Amino acid sequence: MGVAVCVVAALSLAGFSGCHRSNRLTFYKPSLPPVFGARVTDGKLQLWTGTPCERVHHVTILFSPFTGDRLQLETPPDRATTVEYLTLGGPYPGGLTVTEALREDFDWRTKEKILLSVEPTEGAGSDQIELATIIAESPDHPEDTYYFPGFGWLNREQVAEQNRKTLLTMCTKDPVLEPGIPETFGARVTDGKLRIWTVTPCTESNGYSLRFRPPDPTYRDIWYEVWNSQDSPPVEIEHLTFGEEPEGMSTRRPLPDGFDWRTMQSVELGIHRPAYHREGVVDVAEVLAGSASHADDTYYFQGVGWLTPDEARDQEGRTFLSPCRR
């Protein structure tokens, strides 16, 4: 999952930042231009993310100059959808409904630029598009091509060819943020409980979060957060048992009633601390399947396998990256 990503796209007269959630806020310059596409067909403004954006539950469309006009879409509670093509005015895909509408007399043709944002995403976001360009040039280009700022009019094959080479579609993770070895942590089941091991202790920690991913992509990720109690000093996190609060900590984001982590596809661990940290992920099925046949002191590490404490400490930093090891 890697370190956090936040891309800021400044709109005229109003700042707008598109940031996806991660374990700490980091501003960075993408290694390639992050873009989305737009065109006009039959008088309607159409947007294309370039590649599918999965598990989306919020969409925002902003116009510049910014005078308070924006469109916000959201899926029903607990649900998510895949977003790729959008037509201003709808119909909108995957159960997205309008939660903040544009004013009735709004005319997007009077605006200069447009910005599209989806949440959540591991991608680098996107830059703005000049509306005058697509208004003027759309009639001269096939309906399967969209204008991508800096790259011109591209169809699906051309976008696929250039993605991660010369450009980044808005939901494509920047290749420079992908490590050469797995980012993970140790996990196992003992006495029916999910147990977690960071290997290197995470000192000066203020809390941790677990993000559970359902196997069905039409459902949102489910969060569980535990933080230090008010006025409590930072703590060291190394071993965790899911459902048990470490001393001095309390649950701030509880799980929904009836939640069963065993039905999830994966779990991601995020440590909240000012010092260096990264997120790691493991497949729940692997943990469930292998725990009974491995000793209680061995843990499953995604992409590596089951390791004893000595093996984990020896391989940490060589075959995998743990949450708090530089």
Image (spheres, grey):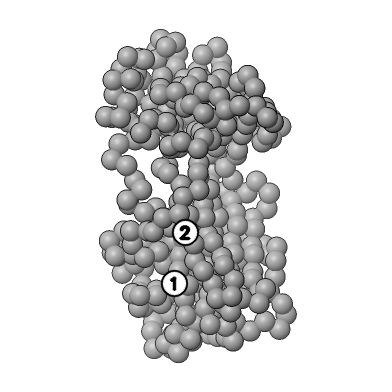
**Image height of 83 relative to 312, above or below:** below
Residue at 30 percent of width and 36 percent of height: 181
State whether residue 46 is above or below residue 304. below
Q: Residue furthest top?
A: 295
Quick one: quadrant of the C terminus? top left
Q: Which residue is mark 2?
A: 7
Q: Nearer the viewer, residue 294 or 207?
A: 207
Q: Secondary structure at mark 1?
A: strand
* Residue 80 seen anywhere in this rendered image of the structure: yes
Q: Residues within 10 Å of mark 1 (few under 14, many from 20)?
A: many
Mark 2 crowdedness (10 Å alpha carbons): few <14, some 14-19, many ≥20: many
Q: Is residue 144 left or right of residue 103?
A: left
Residue 52 is at least partly visible in this image: no
Question: What residue does disc 1 label?
Answer: 37
Amino acid type, label 2? Val
Location of residue 179 in the rendering, given as x and y in whole percent from the top left corner: 32, 42
Q: Is residue 251 left or right of residue 136?
A: right
Q: x, y percentage for residue 171? A: 44, 57
* Amino acid beneath label 1: Gly
Quadrant of residue 89 in the image?
bottom right
Precedes in sequence: disc 2 or disc 1:
2
Quarter of the image that includes the N terminus: top left
Q: Residue 147: x and y, percent? A: 41, 77
- Seen at 44% across and 17% down, the residue is 291
Q: 99 or 284: nearer the eye?
A: 99
| Tag nearer the camera, 2 or 1 | 2
Element marked by disc 2: strand
